[in-house]
Amino acid sequence: MKLANATLKDLPAGIRTPGYDRSRLTPGIVHIGVGNFHRAHQSWYLHRLFEMGSNLDWAIVGAGVRPPDAQMRERLAAQDYLYTLIELDPNGKSAEVVGSMVDFVPVEEGNGPLIGRMADPATRIVTLTVTEGGYYIRPDTKQFDADHPDIRHDAANPDTPRTAFGAMVAALRLRLNRGLGPFTGLSCDNLQGNGNTLRQAVVSLARMSDPAFAEWIEATCTFPNSMVDCIVPATGAKELELARQFGIDDAAPVTHENFRQWVIEDAFCAGRPDLGKAGATLAADVHDFEKMKLRLLNGGHQVIATSGEILGIKTISDTMAHPKIHGLFRKVAEEEISPHVAAVPGFTPAEYIDLIERRFANPEIVDTTRRVAFDGSSRQPGFVIPSIRDGIAAGTPTAGLALVSAIWARYCFGRREDGSMVEPNDPNWEFLTETAKKAAKMPALWLKMPGIYGDVALHEPFVTAFGAWLDQIHRDGLVAAIDTYLARGTPA
């Protein structure tokens, strides 16, 4: 059955469909970056609210600034912005149709339609999932990269920007000129302090062309920090077929694990939906939630994904079935990451490690090591290297994290242990591969890459451990190096 408003009543029994009248929904949120994660996470929370008959004036309008966003718009528009959400519970799969999105802004050069929609008085929140590396922030200094060509373009051409942040600045300028109030900017990306990062990007870009206007944004807009969590694989032929097995012809289905969490700083300048009713946590401070999730789950993902890729293991669940990789994850998480993570309501660090271990091992989640290892040049500085810095500052062990860095360097060498090539998997892949090949003979070069390790490269014990691990991996193989770590805790 082709998915559309008109066919909802005819879908097979057992498929949960919207229990609300979608014609009564009115938009209040513009979301930039309508990928799978957004549709399994934020969009679902709004869908649940609408199921309760609440907050019907907070429907979502999709948006984007890249060519793939236009392709997503085309697919969703053809099915009335509906899509199938398939939960991959180890005890059995289930499917529901989500209806919280009511429109999708045309994706055009200069982003005029997006600017106009964000300047609409009905828009009170702008949310984003633009990836960890999409905020034009240097990972070493955490400062705004004002020299990036996209940013220079937007500063020089504020009415026809290329970036989401330039479009936000242009829309806020229209709102100010029209006597309208500001909107809230809410990042839903995996960044610690993601709201602060979004504020920095928007305000810094505005300041490049109009300092007084930047001060207005700083004073009136809010940018709440948030922690988001749900494992959501990419959609491919298997996921499309899974939707068909449920009896639904859907061009854009989404699969997800049987877990999600959203913790949001309660700071909204123009109102908000009652997300707490749908299961989100509204808090005064989300720092400890963010740190636990980013360091242990996202950092743990990097530990196992790069290891799996080197050994030719295709999925995350299969890496957890590999006793050496599983052991590496557990030891590094318990001994070198969790000592710097505080307990939060509902979880101690040890309990959280147990939880994510079960989630990673879920065989229903066919999440590829390649997908998780993508963009290490953003994810390693975001999720792994902060734990290294904490360990160095506290004088606690970092030899396992040095091994994790050596594994990443070996992965970027570009060839697996079985001799197969690793296809480019990072926006900076050519540079990383070139550096990794040089580092095979001079390991310290890897730690001196600009914008990645920063002052970590000055800590001699870490540099020495990293070099010893990388030498052993190249000489004896990854499993031998992991065995050494599990037995000794330090390089041989």
Image (spheres, helix red, strand yellow):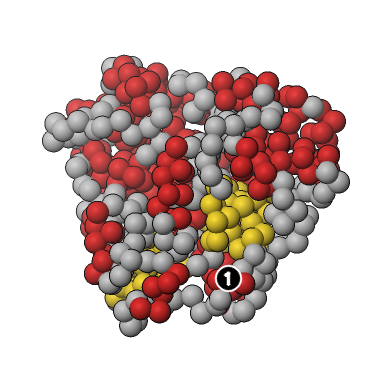
Q: Is residue 163 left or right of residue 361?
A: right
Task: Answer with left or right where residue 353 lies relative to residue 212.
Answer: left
Point 48% across, 24% down: residue: 457
Residue visible at 54% across and 36% down? 108
Image location of residue 224, percent across then percent down: 69, 52
Q: Is residue 379 above or below residue 466?
A: below
Give the residue type that dot 1 points to: Ser
| Residue 69 rendering spot, x and y as whole percentages | 46, 43
Quadrant of residue 11 in the image? Answer: bottom left
Q: Residue at x 33, y 34 (%)?
A: 425
Q: In this view of the protein, can residue 386 be seen by the observer? A: yes
Residue 397 visible? The answer is no
Q: From the viewer's perspective, is 195 left or right of 409?
A: right
Density class for disc 1 (Cα within 10 Å; few <14, some 14-19, many ≥20) is few
Q: Nearer the viewer, residue 232 or 28?
A: 28
State the quadrant of the N terminus.
bottom left
The quarter holding residue 445 reads: top left
**x, y percent for residue 213:** 82, 33
Q: Which residue is mark 1?
A: 23
Quarter that holds the C terminus: top left
